[in-house]
Amino acid sequence: MIINYENEEHRKKVLGLLKKYNKIHSESNKVDIEYLSAFFLLSTSLLNHKKLEKYIHPSGIGINFLKMVEDEYLSSSEEVMIKVAWNLYNSDGDIKPIEIIRFLSNENYNLVIQAMELRRVKHYLEEL
């Protein structure tokens, strides 16, 4: 599978988060797809400036999306991206398809589609 990152910086940020929070199985190099899809969206240029990493539990055992949405001042498109990441992570994050269509640019819409593809099947570090 070819992964369509925004750019090389986006790819490095996703890989860095996966490694930092131990979301790559040490023996098989299998990647945790729930975190992969969430980190993929949280690392986009739309959200990267928000410094959202503070909402990831230090030991990597969860992401506090509710606090993220409540604490941050978010544009409509930023909120949609976070809610999609939340939904892909654990099926929470109340998001409707029409919100994705209405509030996201074509580029960010395509990143959401890519994140959904990442969530569908297992991935290994070598693929990223």
Image (cartoon, rainbow, N blue to C red):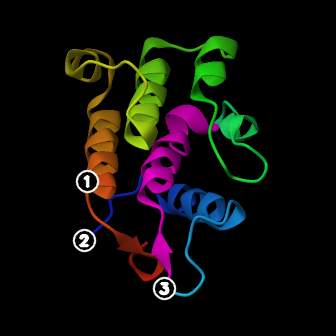
Pointer 3: what residue? 28
Up the image or down, 117 lies above or below 83; here it is below
Q: CA distance from mark 3 to mark 1?
A: 21 Å
Pointer 1: what residue? 117
Amino acid identity at mark 1: Glu
Tell me whether the residue at label 3 lies in contact with that at label 1, contact meaning CB atoms closer than 8 angstroms. Answer: no
Q: What residue is rendered at 42% in x and 50% in y?
A: 37
Where residue 9 sits, quadrant-wise, is bottom right
Which of discs 3 and 1 lies nearer the camera? The answer is 3
Where residue 74 appears, as percent x and y from the top left, is 57, 15
Q: How packed is label 3: few (under 14 Cα within 10 Å), some, or many (20 or more)?
A: few
Up the image or down, 18 lies above or below 111; here it is below
User: Taken as a whole, is the magenta stretch helix, strand or loop?
Assistant: helix
Q: Which mark is residue 1?
A: 2
Left or right of 10, for residue 128? left
Tell me whether the residue at label 1 lies in contact with that at label 2, contact meaning CB atoms closer than 8 angstroms. Answer: yes
Residue 46 belongs to the span the image colors magenta = yes
Where residue 104 sits, quadrant-wise, is top left
The segment highlighted magenta reads 28-48
Image quadrant in which the N terminus is located? bottom left
Up the image or down, 30 lies above or below 120; here it is below
Amino acid identity at mark 3: Ser
